[in-house]
Amino acid sequence: MEECVVSLIDMKAGQRGEIVQILGGRGMVRRLWVLGVVPGKKVEKVSSLLANGPVVIRLGQQEIALGRGVAQKILVKVNG
């Protein structure tokens, strides 16, 4: 299977992967760290609403809604 790196925005609902990088400043990285959104963590995209709605991800048993701007800066390695 081929692996590729995409942002959370570009993942399809139900797709899984591993967070590899967060393209944000220290403040954003710190806020995400508190939520458990860190490189190396396994993540599943639950859903995203069209237009400007939030992106919902699952980390273990926890679901988190992220704004689209933040989700776009989180890079995930997914299996093709």
Image (cartoon, helix red, strand yellow):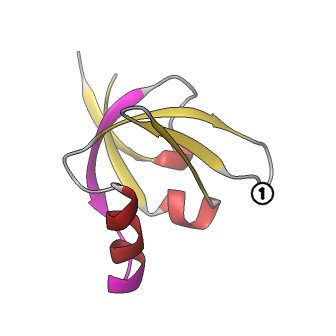
- Above or below for 44 versus 5: above
Rendered residue at 50%/36% (across/down): 11
Q: Quadrant of the N terminus?
A: top left
Pointer 1: what residue? Answer: 52
Residue in front for this viewpoint, 37 or 3:
37
In the displayed orientation, state which residue is furthest to the top: 1
Q: Is residue 37 left or right of residue 14?
A: left
In the displayed orientation, state which residue is furthest to the right: 51
Label 1, residues with CA under 10 Å away: few <14, some 14-19, many ≥20: few
- Quarter of the figure with residue 6: top left
SS under mark 1:
loop
Residue 10 placement (x, y as % from top left): 53, 42
Q: Quadrant of the C terminus?
A: top left
Residue 51 placement (x, y as % from top left): 80, 51
In the displayed orientation, state which residue is furthest to the front: 61
- Above or below for 54 versus 43: below
Q: Is residue 33 magenta?
A: no
Residue in front for this viewpoint, 72 or 26:
26
Q: Is residue 19 magenta?
A: yes
Q: Is residue 71 left or right of residue 4?
A: right
- Quarter of the figure with residue 37: bottom left
The kind of residue on which mark 1 rests is Asn
Rendered residue at 77%/57% (across/down): 52
In the displayed orientation, state which residue is furthest to the left: 40
Residue in front for this viewpoint, 77 or 45:
45
Residue 31 placement (x, y as % from top left): 41, 73
Rendered residue at 25%/44% (across/down): 41
Residue 17 placement (x, y as % from top left): 32, 33
Q: Is residue 30 left or right of residue 68?
A: left
Q: Which residues are magenta?
A: 16-27
Across the whole image, how many numbered discs are drawn on residues? 1
